[in-house]
Image (cartoon, grey):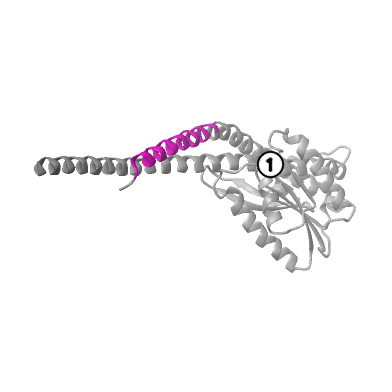
Amino acid sequence: MPNLKDIRTRIDSVKKTKQITSAMKLVAAAKLRRASERATAARPYRDQLEAVLRRVAGAAGDEIDEPLLQPRETVSKVLVVVVTSDRGLCGAFNNGLLRHTWDWLQAKKATGATVDVQLYGRKGQAFFRRMKQEVKQATTDYARTPKMEIVEPLTASMVAGFVDGEYDEVWLVYNRFVSNLVQTPTYDRVLPLSVEGKEEDASAEAAGEYRYEPDAAEILGELLPLFLQTLVLGCFLETEAGFFAAQMTAMDSATRNASDLIGRLTLEYNRARQAAITKEIIEIVSGAAAL
């Protein structure tokens, strides 16, 4: 027969766990609202800036000679910046991204390219340490750092590495926030940048008859680093929103599971208690009958 004291102790333990997961769910939900607003608000700005770049590039025509736009004939060395979270308790948010990224890295290496990995987040650092993958640089505990203090030096190092010829391509790997239930592993090639014009951009350029001063090529050179910063900033904003969404979902599931477990343990406790009472009654009746 199950020990009643052990069952009561386990019920109390699960109730305390439920209180913690419920509180974490509420905290994640509150932070998610702000983080998702920032992530979604950055997207129209990025899209509009990209449209402006396309128009300016179309106006510059053959005058474009920007190093950040020049693709390499052969890709022999690649920098991959992987952004994960520092904390866990967020379901498969990090593991799903890192498993896909590992396969993606192997495919890159199979082409003959040398891959350098730069990490943000403890979870990514722990994963690549287990996989015995050498990491160029790992940054942890970055969540409380203002985003631009991370983005500006990272963007500068990306540009320097690409322009100096150290890297032929630079990629950003992160979870894109789609909804509270969906975060999609995303692989964006950010260098060399691409601002190829579209037909609608060309028609808008012709209709607007824009005049650029000093000239379109020089304006393009000023806008490209800003556009790159916008892409990198968006990566961190998407990761932050996705993390809180995944954590809220995971804590909600854990809270519901704890409630179910408490119900099952309470039923087990009541049955064991009833069995103990029945046994005592039988013993009393049997003792009375023996007298």
Circle 1: is it few (<14), some (14-19), or many (20+) Cα within 10 Å? many
Left or right for 43, reference 27: right
Q: Is residue 183 left or right of residue 159?
A: left
Q: Nearer the viewer, residue 270 or 189?
A: 270
Q: Tell me where residue 108 appears, x and y as whole percent.
A: 73, 63
| Residue 207 visible (yes or no) | no
Which residue occupies the foreground of this view, 55 or 177?
Answer: 177
Query: Left or right: where does residue 143 sit relative to residue 191?
Result: left
- Quadrant in the picture for the C terminus: top left
- Per the rendered image, the range of residues in magenta is 3-27
Is 172 situated above or below 13?
Answer: below
Asked if the magenta segment contains residue 19, the reply would be: yes
At x 63% / y 41%, what residue is drawn? 87
The image shows residue 43 at horizontal and vertical percentages of: 65, 40
Which element type, helix, strand or loop, lies under badge 1? helix
How far across and down, in percent of the image, does residue 262 sit? 37, 40
Residue 153 image offset from top left, x and y in percent: 82, 40
- Residue 193 position (above or below residue 29): below
Instruction: Identify which residue, 193 or 62, lies in the foreground.
Output: 193
Name the residue that disc number 1 marks. Answer: 236
Q: Residue at x 44, y 39 (%)?
A: 255
Residues 106 and 55: in front is 106
